[in-house]
Image: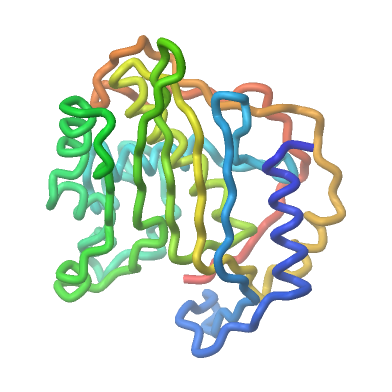
């Protein structure tokens, strides 16, 4: 059992046994019913990537390739345009959040990165002084929320810090989410931001260090309780999955491609578990 598997099972059990029921829930299922959930607040996990601890479960297959492509759409393309995500990356799941018939998700995510030139600023700050304590990505933009419709960002803040150990510099990252669907998106979101952390580390020729993951509202929807029990009943495999980025140290952030990532030693339990998403 990996560290991620233990955390996953512990969180599922805690939510199911001690979770609070949502009230006045915003999301809907595709049949129009309100998507209520049980949730806990203040979930935190720490993974030492340098020691091979990665936030991905073996209890069900996780679509890592699609997840990483979403990060490229947000932070390299710096776009909210669904046609880019659909045509360039062949990723479709964001289509359910299209705003009207705009072919966008509103002024969200990549649009905010571009608006504030976030990546270039982060890279320059880390180049000028790697030990500065101001390397913050924030996608929470009230002006943008007022300007357009769209889903408010769930994974909305990332922070980066460096540590020197001997001759090596390690890049640590902290991801903060306001809301997270435990069964569907938990490991997808975590591994996405590990990929972003690895891209920035490669840009400077540093090693990846620790990944800290804080979620304010961690929930399981009421149409997922059967799947939650199935996951609790499953026994994890013996694999030790880890993500690698196959480019030389010092490769420019914007020259890295999704196919440069490879998930090794990943043999999850099958069959896949299906979920009806809350929109």
Decide: is 130 above or below 217.
Answer: above
Residue 104 relative to residue 265: left or right: left
Q: Residue at x 16, y 38 (%)?
A: 121
Q: Residue at x 70, y 52 (%)?
A: 8
Decide: is 114 above or below 28.
Answer: above
Residue 225 relative to residue 72: left or right: right
Q: Residue at x 61, y 42 (%)?
A: 62
Q: Nearer the viewer, residue 52 or 101?
A: 52
Quadrant of image for the N terminus: top right
Decide: is 73 above or below 273.
Answer: above
Query: What x and y, as percent, mark residue 244?
Result: 51, 21
Residue at the bottom extreme, as displayed:
24
Q: Quadrant of residue 226?
A: bottom right
Query: What x and y, as percent, mark residue 189?
Result: 49, 49
Residue 37 relative to residue 104: left or right: right
Query: What x and y, as percent, mark residue 27?
Result: 48, 77
Q: Nearer the viewer, residue 189 or 157?
A: 157
Q: How many marks?
A: 0
Residue at the front extreme, as displayed:
166
Q: Quadrant of residue 243?
A: top right
């Amino acid at each position: 059992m990996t560290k991620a598997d233990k955390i996953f099972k512990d969180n599922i059990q805690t939510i199911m046994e001690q979770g609070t029921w949502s009230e006045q829930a915003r999301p809907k299922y595709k049949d129009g019913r309100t998507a209520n959930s049980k949730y806990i607040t203040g979930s935190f996990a720490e993974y030492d990537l340098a020691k091979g601890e990665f936030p991905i479960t073996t209890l069900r297959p996780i679509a890592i390739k699609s997840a990483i492509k979403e990060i490229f759409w947000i932070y390299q393309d710096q776009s909210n345009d669904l046609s880019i995500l659909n045509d360039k990356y062949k990723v479709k799941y964001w289509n359910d959040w299209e705003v009207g018939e705009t072919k966008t998700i509103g002024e969200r995510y990549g649009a905010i990165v571009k608006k504030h030139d976030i990546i270039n600023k982060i890279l320059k700050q880390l180049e000028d002084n790697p030990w500065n304590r101001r390397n913050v990505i924030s996608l929470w933009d009230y002006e943008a929320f007022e300007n357009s419709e769209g889903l408010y960002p769930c994974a909305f803040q990332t922070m980066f810090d460096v540590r020197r150990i001997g001759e090596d510099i390690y890049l640590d990252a902290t991801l903060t989410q306001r809301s997270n669907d435990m069964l569907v998106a938990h490991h997808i979101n975590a591994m996405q931001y590990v990929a972003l952390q690895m891209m920035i580390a490669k840009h400077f020729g540093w090693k990846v260090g620790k990944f800290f993951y804080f979620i304010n509202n961690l929930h399981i929807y009421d149409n997922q309780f059967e799947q939650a029990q199935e996951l609790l009943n499953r026994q994890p495999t013996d694999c030790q999955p880890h993500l690698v980025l196959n480019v030389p140290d010092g490769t420019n952030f914007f020259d890295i491609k999704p196919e440069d990532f490879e998930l090794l030693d990943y043999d999850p339990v099958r069959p896949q578990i299906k979920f009806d998403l809350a929109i």
